[in-house]
Image: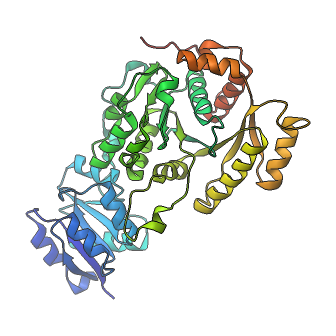
Amino acid sequence: MALQVFTAVTGAAWESELVGALDREDHGVTVVRRCVDVGDLLAAATTGTGQAVLLSAELRRLDGAAVARLTAAGVAVVGLVEPGDTRATERLRQWGVGRVLSADADPETIARALREAVTGERPAGHEVGDPRAALPVLGLPAEEQDRPAGRGRVVAVWGPTGAPGRTTVAVGLADEAARLDVATLLVDADVYGGVVAQVLGLLDESPGVVAAARQASAGTLDLAALTRLAWAVTPRLRVLTGLARADRWPELRPQGVEVVLEEARRLAALTVVDCGFAVEEDEELSFDTAAPRRNGATLAVLAAADEVLCVSGADPVALQRTVRALGELRDVLPDVEPAVVVNQVRRGPVPGDPQREITAALERFAGREVRAFLPADRRSTDAALAGGRTLAEVAPGSPLRTGLRALAAELAGVPASTGRRGRRRA
């Protein structure tokens, strides 16, 4: 049976000739509809009459959200670009188009790419290469040019509702990793109101993560752009600030967040992301069509992260919330295996030895071991918050700071005793 294909390459001088050459019996492809714009293409995708679409990067109003909707509708996407147009290639790849071909490819090659896209086979070697590997690192400070080669790691700091200390842990881990001489990026992706900028004393009313996600959706986010959007707090620590106003959550689209994290891997050896607490997908129960997902950004971060830390409080109420949250996460993202970090550990709320009792409770009710225990140190955290500074700056001998440093070293894969003291830039 012939592969049913949509095309959306209007405006290209070679469109008519391509469609005519492609829609032949010997290629095993049938063009069932030639779409004139994104709206027409999305409407056609919902009919279930096509298995794949061949589109060009110049299609008006095409963005990452449109590509995601096509994929969700079960339509495989193959992109076409003008020969040598590396910017268009990069834009399509940022939008999630896995197969991008040059427009001068022969019809049989294009037909084969369409079939591979539908079946999920590996590319046959005729694709345009990823141009980002050859792009110069524009606008990157000289002290950051020596960052380790390869893909950086992404660590998501997540946890249940009830203020278990997610932001405190995320900021502490990022700061300590930077002090261990690891190029680090801290991202505030809490869609319920990020406070990383306030915690660090950054007077920023324009959320950097939204600007980065917006550029990602437009296909214009690159390493230089991400570098400009992230605050340089110390020579080794950059911060992408978050939503100061929770009502701006629709601006943080999951597809854009995924691209931001991919660029973050190129910018920093370690990216620490402060997430929101909720992972429910209630939108699917309320709408028959694609709808904005408030928790979509959180789910995108958790799915993309190399490691997820579930931050729990150390009292019975917090532990119960943690057990429930771990169960909810398992239902939504069964492949994600979070590591539990118990914060604010102290004697009193839990009878007996807190660490032993908490370990036993989490193993029994959640089937999880505890990765790390972080002691309560209210005096030091209050001093840091009041001054808009980090624990290392206001209380270098704090036991909480010691615990965060050890965990940061473990996550970054470096010894905890090395590093240099970072200085805040004026």
Residue 377, by quadrant, is: top right
As displayed, is residue 403 above or below residue 17? Answer: above
Q: Is residue 357 above or below residue 121?
A: above
Quadrant of image for the C terminus: top left
Residue 142: image x %, image y %? Answer: 38, 19
* Residue 109 shows in this picture: no
Residue under the point 39% across and 29% down: 230
Above or below for 287 versus 302: below
Is 301 situated left or right of 211 in this image? right
x 33%, y 80%: residue: 48
Q: Quadrant of the N terminus?
A: bottom left
In front here: 113 or 327? 327
State whether residue 229 appears in this view: yes
- Residue 298, position as x, y percentages in the image: 51, 49
Residue at 51% across, 12% down: 423
Q: Position of residue 271 (x, y in %)?
A: 51, 36
